[in-house]
Amino acid sequence: MNVISVRSIDEKFFRETISRASDFKQELKTRDYEKTLKNCLVTLCFFEPSTRTYQSFQTAAKHLGAEVNGFESAKSTSVQKGETLADTLRNMQSYNPSCIIMRHPAEGSAKYAAEILEVPVINAGDGANQHPTQTMLDVFTIEEQGGLDDKKISLVGDLKHARTMHSLPYGIGLMGYENVTMNFVSPPGLEMPGKIIREIREYGFEIVQSNDLLSASDSDFVYACRIQKERFEDRMLAEQFQEKFRLDDDFIKRVENKGMKILHPLPIAGEISPSVYETRHAHWFTQSGNGVPVRMTLLNKVISNE
Amino acid sequence: MSEIKVNKIRDGCVVDHVPVGRGLTLLHLLELEDESYVLLSKCDSASRGVKDVVKIYDYSLSEKQLRLVSIVAPTSTYNVIRDYDVVGKQELESPPRFEGLAHCPNPNCVTNHSRIGSIDNKFVVRGEGEEIECAYCEKSYDPPALEWLA
């Protein structure tokens, strides 16, 4: 059982993970959970740095009683000496892990790892392609706030490049919510790729696209991400876009839905004003914390099929 | 528009019912060198409205070339002509996936990274060949945009 891409995850597996994660979240509060992965080894192969995902997986594994090994950066590995990705992974597999969790800058690298290895592989991010466990925790966060039946979610920011934005609609689709309005809000030129819009139409969403941030003011959820300034030749233009699409006091004053939750995959790099952190809408740290119960559930399912 | 008359070929092959616009792509991919050929673009088609047609004189497509045609022009028909008669006809179907015929153009695809190990290019054909998706990086391309291997 590999977890590589949200586009190929089994629907039943996805929903079971979301459902079971809420049990783990409750059990974490009272430390009343079973260490089901004693005598298991979880290997983290992070070829590029990631604070949250690495720590979250490590925490999840340790809560379940597993041993953890691996590396946080390629700098500490024989990749520096020219070793191939295949050889590095096969070497880590030789220490008999129960699963390998991998982050690598090359798109498709997790799929490749799953092909050449005999142990389960969980994709913790492959370049700009997929980050399926982020999608799982995002959807879990939405589900624990009541789900999306008859509701509206706005995805705001650089929808062209952000992989979390590309994956989330598929994750929402896998939950089978009904009557969902999905509002894609972005600066001109950074719209959601047409291929994704074509594919997610099969989930029956009402899909709206806008270049106006205020179109998100009546949403039940706003999922924001940064403008990827490093992709702009004209940095002034990037700054203007960030200014125009920043969630700030002015946006909060115009929010029509008092129960709106604002989500963000982190890190926040200026697209949300500090004053918004103190509002009832700020939900991104709860969202981030949900990574632990979700990843505990996933490790359990992948390693011991529970 | 005045009619254009194209004579039947005596010996060779005809790829008929090519989706409009794909005829030129086909010719490019087939890498014909000394062969004579005719490309008819946007012809009337009783069954499909409009089509492209490729006629190649004194030539038969190889297995590899037929695979390419089935991917790039999945709705086409391959006809073998001998002495003005159609002696063989094959309706081509796009395979759902294929390996090794092309490179993924995405520079950040794992198939284009150095120091990976042994890896073959693999693709998934979407719809009726409108898009070809790299099985690794999941990016989609129009068939002409792929880096087809010689």
Image (spheres, grey):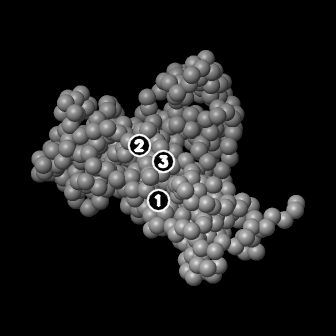
Specify the quadrant of the image occupied by residue A214.
top right
Indicate the amino acid at tag 1. Answer: Val
Q: Residues within 10 Å of mark 1 (few under 14, many from 20)?
A: some
- Tell which subunit mark 2 falls on: B
Give the residue at x 18% y 47%: A90
Q: Nearer the viewer, residue A297 or B51?
A: B51
- Amino acid residing under circle 2: Cys
Question: Which label was assigned to residue A47?
Answer: none
Cα–Cα gap, marks 3 and 2: 13 Å
Marked residue nearer the N-terminal end (2 or 1)? 2
Secondary structure, mark 3, is strand
Mark 3 vs mark 1, CA separation in Å: 15 Å
Q: Which chain hosts label 3?
A: B
User: Do residues under tags 3 and 2 come within 8 Å of each other at their CB atoms?
Assistant: no
User: Which amino acid type is marked by label 3?
Assistant: Glu
Q: Which residue is mark 3?
A: B147
Q: Residue B97: x and y, percent?
A: 45, 63
In the picture, measured across the screen, residue A71 lies left or right of residue A206, that is left
The foreground one among B63 and A35 is B63
Q: How many marks?
A: 3
Q: Are marks 3 and 1 in contact (CB under 8 Å)?
A: no
Q: Is residue A84 visible?
A: yes
Give the residue number, with chain letter if any, for mark 1. Answer: B124
What residue did someone put label 2 on? B109
- Note whether A31 is above or below A156 in the view shown: below
**SS for dot 1:** strand
